[in-house]
Amino acid sequence: MRQYELVERVKSYDPSADEEALNRAYVFAMKMHIAQVRESGDPYFSHPLSVAEILTQYHLDTATIIAALLHDTIEDTAASYADLKELFSADVANLVKGVTKLSKVQIHSEETKQAENFQKLVLATSTDIRVLLIKLADRLHNMRTLHFCKKPEKRYRIAKETMEIYVPLAERIGMQALKDEMEDWSFQILYPEAHKSIQSRLHFLSEQGKQDVETVINELKNDLEEHNLSANISGREKRPYSIWRKMQKKNISFEQVCDVMAFRIIVDSTASCYQTLGIIHTKYPMIPGRYKDYISTPKPNGYRSIHTGVIGPLNRRIEVQIRTKDMHAVAEYGVAAHWEYKEGVHKEGKQYRWLRDLLDLMNHSSSPNEFLEHTKIAMYQDQVFCFSPKGDLITLPRGAGPIDFAYAVHSRVGDTCVGVKINGKIKPLRTVLENGDQVEIMTNKNQTPSPEWEHLAVTAKAKACIRRFIRAQQYEKNLILGKDYFNNAAKEYCISWNEKELQPLLDQYKQNSVNDFLAAIGAGLIPFKDVFNQLHPDCIPSGFKRAISLFKKSKSDTLLDKKMPVTGLISGIALKFGKCCHPVPGDAIVGIVTTGKDVTIHTQDCPTLTQYQDESERWLDVDWNMSVVQDKVLPVKIKIVLEDRPSSLTELTNIIAKHNVPLTNLNTQSRSNGFSDIIIEVEVKNNNELDVLLQALRSYKHIATVHRMKA
Ligand code: MN
């Protein structure tokens, strides 16, 4: 096709087309592709030109035709989005950019069940319906020339992709002719043997049956003319792929499929369609189950026609489609052809009407705004489609991140997720995924879900899995805690105990199992003392309480040891500092009698204390003996969330050193989102010194959070 022919073609259906811009696009695309050759040996420019030509059949607007000419320039030549925007228009540049983006959608997976997701991905990526139309025309031309491709596996992949993604999309928007052609090209490559055999038998049959077809057409014509109906009747060529599919689907032979001759009757009006149907049904016996009225109930893609099957002339089974010219045009070219017959003349602005019809079909959005506004596809904008490294497509709600992706793959993958690579690069777990992202979840079998993930996750599945895990983990902790209560009590009262003795109490406490019971006690939902008293009523007034009273400071106590680090205790008992809260001088503290001989000092806000809340007899009022402790140092644990930077750890240790505080331990737990959890242990003289250090750490800009650990 020559330059002037293309322009003429566009002008024939759109007299207002921008001739100058079309010419400029033609020349520009030819120049940009000048050095490139197709596998067929043709100059590369023959491809975009053919794509533009295909689209003129659908009477598309100038911007689409120009974009078709330019559709490979961003991807394959030096031209950029900015160039196209400057030389043509933002509209054209956006269309080309859209097609370029779409070209990255490729099926790598063998999973056929993914096809529907891919179709959605294509629709979601298209955003403008014209992008999809250019892509379909592009694909059609590539299919026509696919036999030139030298790599068999590439040929196969492209044919499969066409069959699974583009054929259904073309069908969905009613582009029957385009769909049929793509389907047969794909069939030929995917099943070469079947195609060859069906093709040659079809050829034989049509040679042999020519006479019969003529006879039937003439008879039917006569039948209609008797009723003053003029019609255009033709024999319908069967397509190899549709025969093959019928053979597969109904498990029947080639002969059985082709035994039925197919005809198409085109009449003037809808009324004539029904009249024709009446004439045929009156004269010939109808084959039950073959009658379908797509005129009164059109297919979702706009297809309208009457189908019926009868035992017709020559006693042959025939299949008949009855429709008007208008309906026929829609059946072949989709809604594209629709308006042309309806409107008769091209009034300004009507060019896009079919696009609007098409979009109505697709999104049911029909606010009467600007035409081009309407070329936006609003489908699947609430979803995001991402690939696994194997090429599987995972559909997630918009806003989803790697955690959601991981759980969508498998809950085990989610539970052990430590990091993510998106399009080959390590990214934070809080990254929001985008259409077409390739997502690789990194796992470590020792990893467990972090409670923070619950805030990152968007999908119900991920949230549920994280919660379930946290609950299970909590349950384990509570179970151990519950057992500890009994073990400690047993030790203190010198009795032996067995989990089984809880069994008889299950009903009373509405528990399903001994473990549930112990976990409920551990969680503090059931007071330990109640259960213990019920099981061992004798133990209550034991020597335990008396032993405790011995430790308690009485007002008249003169035995107070001046050398004890805390006041309020008598001498001679073993004093420990809680490993949980690491109290330091200056902290408000409390003493807890742990065994018969020890007292442990906790800070008054230590979370561990909750487990003693029902046992007031074990709590001792104590305070720091400052004269004893002022020269001593005590350990403290601090948790820091530090940004991952090459020098940040060094700077952190510098801050600590500057404060003259000995650093005794440093533990890094790397996280994947650009931050690390660091736990340090330092030794301080008192909580003043500690506060100064914490303040200094907090003011360092690459530290996200700092807190003293108390559990
Ligand atoms: Mn192309």
Image (spheres, rainbow, N blue to C red):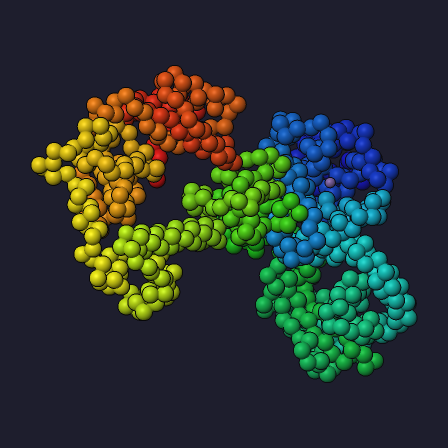
Farthest-out residue, top:
658
Q: At x 44% / y 21%, what residue is drawn?
A: 653
- Percent from the top left, x then y, of residue 656? 39, 21
Q: Quadrant of the C terminus?
A: top left
Q: At x 64% / y 44%, what residue is drawn?
A: 389
Q: At x 68% / y 71%, what residue is drawn?
A: 307
The answer to whether residue 210 is visible is: no
Q: At x 66% / y 35%, what residue is drawn?
A: 18
- Percent from the top left, x then y, of residue 446? 53, 44
View quadrant of ligand 1: top right
Task: Give 174 or 10, whichever is nearer the viewer.
Answer: 174
Task: Give 239 or 452, whichever is nearer the viewer.
Answer: 452
- Percent from the top left, x then y, of residue 536? 25, 62
- Percent from the top left, x then y, of residue 45? 78, 35
Note whether 231 is above or below 657 in the view shown.
Answer: below
Looking at the rendering, which quadrant does residue 572 occupy? top left
Say left or right for 136 vs 471. right
Say left or right for 277 vs 367. right
Task: Give 176 or 452, whichever is nearer the viewer.
Answer: 452
